[in-house]
Amino acid sequence: DTGVSQNPRHKITKRGQNVTFRCDPISEHNRLYWYRQTLGQGPEFLTYFQNEAQLEKSRLLSDRFSAERPKGSFSTLEIQRTEQGDSAMYLCASSRPGLAGDEQYFGPGTRLTVT
Amino acid sequence: SQKIEQNSEALNIQEGKTATLTCNYTNYSPAYLQWYRQDPGRGPVFLLLIRENEKEKRKERLKVTFDTTLKQSLFHITASQPADSATYLCALYNFNKFYFGSGTKLNVKP
């Protein structure tokens, strides 16, 4: 399968714990996006990478969230000191070089439950 | 920031009919507007993209229109099938960000 993969698919954690998610984009895609989606809502933009550079980060993101994309390949999203409000589906998407607003290929998501 | 409105109520139609979904936005016109399909528990799947200088785009049974004066996009599925039942999301792109609507759930009844 050459699509976008995300791990883990599900994560249950206790409030206050740190969690880290991984996204492996399609290999030739240089653009990578992270989103958060809650029930009944559309994906909410979190951050954007072009190669290894983080070019955009949502103002909605608190400093408990951090993302990296070393070497411009896979990316990780870390949430520190999780809160119940962090419970959501975290989606990763990638797109190819070229048009900045080109189609995105989404992964299956990581569902986070904070108890 | 950009605000996007999609009908929050589900759209129920009969198989074979044309489904029309609406996406309205405020503020500035996006460089690109996209439509995605999302099934429960899965990531969105790209369907169509239309640029700000395009009025209409078609792909098989799908058609998208883009009216920058009305700040509206319409998404049509002709000859709808039960397999088309899903949530449809519109997304606007500007300045390195995508803004998604909350989606409209389409139910196609046989």
Image: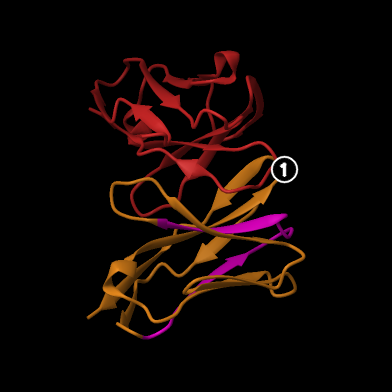
Kindly identify which residue carries mark 1.
B95
Residue A63 in percent (x, y) is at: 54, 21
Q: State the SS at label 1.
A: loop
B27 magenta-colored: yes
Near-viewer residue (A19 or A5): A5
Residue B40 visible (yes or no): yes
> Within 10 Å of the Cα at label 1, are there few (<14), some (14-19), or many (20+) other Cα atoms?
few
Q: Main secondary structure of the magenta part?
A: strand
**Which quadrant would residue B8 be assigned to in this image?**
bottom left
Residue A83 in percent (x, y) is at: 35, 26
Residue A70 in percent (x, y) is at: 56, 13
Q: Which chain is orange?
A: B
Residue B76 as seen in the image, left or right of residue A41: right
- Label 1 sits on what residue type? Phe
Rendered position, A113 above or below A41: above
Residue A22 as seen in the image, left or right of residue A56: left
Image point 59% across, 19% down: which residue?
A: A72
In the rendered image, the quadrant that contains the N terminus of chain A is: top left
Rendered position, B105 above or below A30: below
Image point 28% across, 47% down: which residue?
A: B41
B79 magenta-colored: no
Residue B89 as seen in the image, left or right of residue A15: right
Subunit that carries the residue with mark 1: B
Q: Which residues are magenta?
A: B17-37
Rendered position, B85 above or below A13: below
Image point 46% across, 46% down: which residue?
A: A43
Q: Which chain is red?
A: A
**Which quadrant would residue A59 be assigned to in this image?**
top right
**Which quadrant would residue A53 be assigned to in this image?**
top right
Residue B46 in percent (x, y) is at: 49, 53
